[in-house]
Image (tube, grey):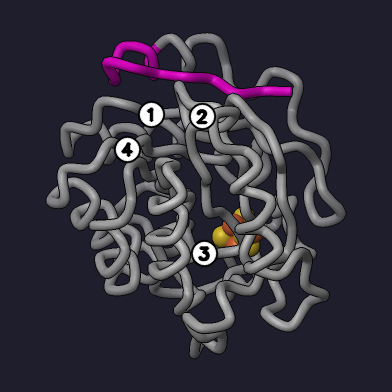
Amino acid sequence: MPATATAHAGPRIGGLTPFTSIDYPGKLSAVVYLLGCPWRCAYCHNQHLQARDAPAGPAWPALKTWLRGRRGLLDAVVFSGGEPTLDAALGPAMDEVRELGFATGLHSAGMYPRRLRAVLSRTDWVGLDVKAPLDDDALHERITGVAGGIDAVRESLRAVREAGIAHEVRTTAHSSLLDDAALLRLAGSVASLGIQRYALQLARATGTTAPRALNYPARSTVARLRTMFAHFTLRAD
Ligand code: SF4
């Protein structure tokens, strides 16, 4: 999908979380949500951000003005989405955020490894989604609705590790899409690469998923996950 925003105009913003302590571990952050994502994950909670031409939120110049007033109150700005690497103006926007004195965080599902590589030198921390075992494209397609995605995710993970940037691999999981066995396969495929930080985020029900099974994941699965990573986090609401 071609990127349509220009560096001049700034990225196309769909929304803003002005203050969060959980989207960039250890930092007080604002989260800027960029518009556009070609995947259609059944559990997506940001469906309003999927269309590149969805109604935009604040314009980039106005957001920068707001950020100037947040200096000393926030540590970082996290770019999320949608899929933020879709936007050609992401890199210049990250540069400007750093010039304002903030660290830069990036949430990505890893679908555009070349675009991800292009912004890694401007990124201080990456949260990379891995949605299925790294060798299971069929399951990845079932979750995202798009074939061939897992190859891109593997390449993106390689890029982040080669760049030596602080990162967390995270999985949003729903019992109807990723059962305990698949979850453990996924975690095993990530742990075998030497990933130290892994977070499991339990998806809530959306219009396209049933309520999450009450016993998901099993206690024994969580116990296994804790042994596989130096830092394991379970996020549930
Ligand atoms: S990759 Fe993220 S933004 Fe895109 S559909 Fe999936 S959950 Fe939603």
Label 2 sits on a secondary structure element that is strand
Q: Which quarter of the image is occupied by the C terminus? A: top right
Residue that lies at the very extreme toward the right in this rendered image: 207
* Residue numbers of the magenta segment: 224-237
Label 3 sits on a secondary structure element that is helix
For residue 48, which quarter of the picture?
A: bottom right
Return the residue at label 2: 200
Q: Nearer the viewer, residue 162 or 38?
A: 162
209 vs 160, left or right, is right
Q: Earlier in the sequence, mark 1 or mark 3?
A: 3
Q: Answer yes or no: disc 3 within 8 Å of ligand 1.
A: no
**Amino acid on which disc 2 is placed:** Leu
Q: Answer yes or no: disc 2 within 8 Å of ligand 1.
A: no
Mark-to-mark CA distance, 1 and 2: 7 Å
12 vs 230, left or right, is right
Q: Tell me if residue 57 is in the magenta stretch.
A: no
Residue displayed at 29% across by 33% down: 188
204 vs 178, left or right, is right
Point out which mark residue 112 bears.
Answer: none
Question: Are the residues flagged by discs 1 and 2 in contact, CB closer than 8 Å?
Answer: yes
Question: Are the residues flagged by discs 4 and 2 in contact, CB closer than 8 Å?
Answer: no
Q: Nearer the viewer, residue 230 or 136?
A: 230
Mark-to-mark CA distance, 2 and 3: 21 Å
Return the residue at label 4: 167
Mark-to-mark CA distance, 1 and 3: 21 Å
**Amino acid on which disc 1 is placed:** Tyr
Q: Tell me if residue 233 is in the magenta stretch.
A: yes
Point out which mark residue 198 bears.
Answer: 1
Query: Few, some or many C-alpha atoms within 10 Å of disc 3 (few <14, some 14-19, many ≥20)?
Result: many
Residue displayed at 60% across by 23% down: 235
Return the residue at label 3: 84
